Image (spheres, rainbow, N blue to C red):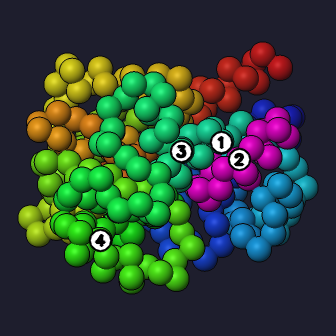
Amino acid sequence: MKEKKAAAFPQGRILYTEGDSSLNPHYIELYRNACKKYGLRLQFGTYDPNLPATEGLSACRMEDGSQECVPQFVINRTRNERLAECLEQAGICVFNSSFVTKIGNDKAEAYRYMQQRNIPIMPTVYGTRQPPQWYPAVVKSCDGHGGTEVYFVQNKEEWQRWKEQSRQETKRYVIQKAASDFGMDVRVYVVGNKIKAAVLRRSRTDFRSNYCLGGHVRMYRLSAVERELAERVIDGLSIGMAGIDFIFHQGQMVFNELEDVAGARGLYTLTDYDIVDDYVKYITEQMTDIMKKS
Ligand SMILES: Nc1ncnc2c1ncn2[C@@H]1O[C@H](COP(=O)(O)OP(=O)(O)O)[C@@H](O)[C@H]1O
Ligand SMILES: [Mg+2]
């Protein structure tokens, strides 16, 4: 009797890439507690980046060493779109969907997608063969995070210096016109395709407003126009939980990036809203729906 009941609980995995410096035991504990509260079973696992992502769960190590049962859902915090795709093909519900992981971890893909959907972005050139078409410009790697691979280029001389320094680089980059309102952005937190909160991040010392670089945060109230823009970005995507970041050009919000593996430290310091709890609640509802249908 007891065993039958346990089998009805959706089984899940939360996956990180081995050696990921953003792996935070406290954050995983938040997931575990929320899963316990909602009756989900969650196991922690790591993806070995030396193995092909196409091997799916066989390329992952689970905390208790077992691989025996295929989970019903995966919370994918590996940033690996191929792994997500492979798990989806095996019939596993993956949060976020592989497409969200793709545009969340490749700025060129994200800007192309947003351009196709008429979402405003700063004028963008894909690649750094040609010098910027405008100064000041911002040069950023397609797969960077936390502002560490984002460079401000004031003029031709700075561009030549950047080019010289990055001669050996094999990374892909985009060049953008610098937005006029430096050092600030708004992160819109989304759970289950719905806007849940927005924070304004501002730096007093840097053109980059990343929280991990010392940006200050406060809650932000979106105007009706801004909310409508954020909703247009969300529309057509399948977001479990993500941050959508906007910068400001002449006072108008412009899409900057989608953060697939959104950290929520800033949000937890500002409000009682428990985004992990809300996310796990959403996953529970999704899984309950799917299990009812099958
Ligand atoms: N085109 C731009 N104009 C002005 N500031 C920018 C521009 N692009 C990025 N920034 C600033 O740099 C920060 C980091 O850039 P971002 O594209 O978000 O890269 P990362 O993924 O490393 O956070 C942004 O939060 C924003 O404050
Ligand atoms: Mg950013």
Left-right relation of 206 to 273:
left
Mark 3, other Cα within 10 Å: few <14 / some 14–19 / many ≥20: some
Q: How many marks?
A: 4
Task: Return the residue at label 3.
Answer: 109
Q: Earlier in the sequence, mark 2 or mark 1?
A: 2
Query: Which is in the foreground here, disc 4 or disc 2?
Result: 4
State the CA–CA distance, disc 2 to disc 1: 5 Å
Task: Return the residue at label 2.
Answer: 84
State the CA–CA distance, disc 2 to disc 3: 17 Å
Dot 3: element: helix
Task: Return the residue at label 1.
Answer: 98
Q: Nearer the viewer, residue 55 or 191?
A: 55
Please, what is the three-letter code of the amino acid marked with disc 3?
A: Glu
Which residue: 32% across, 32% down? Answer: 120
State the CA–CA distance, disc 3 to disc 4: 24 Å
Query: Which is in the foreground here, disc 3 or disc 4?
Result: 4
Q: Earlier in the sequence, mark 1 or mark 4?
A: 1
Q: Position of residue 177 (x, y in %)?
A: 26, 50
State the CA–CA distance, disc 4 to disc 2: 37 Å
Q: Nearer the viewer, residue 122 or 161?
A: 161
Residue span colored magenta: 75-92
Which residue: 27% across, 37% down? Answer: 254
Quarter of the C terminus within the rendering:
top right
Left-right relation of 61 to 117:
right
Mark 1, other Cα within 10 Å: few <14 / some 14–19 / many ≥20: many
Q: Position of residue 181 (x, y in %)?
A: 12, 48
State the CA–CA distance, disc 1 to disc 4: 35 Å
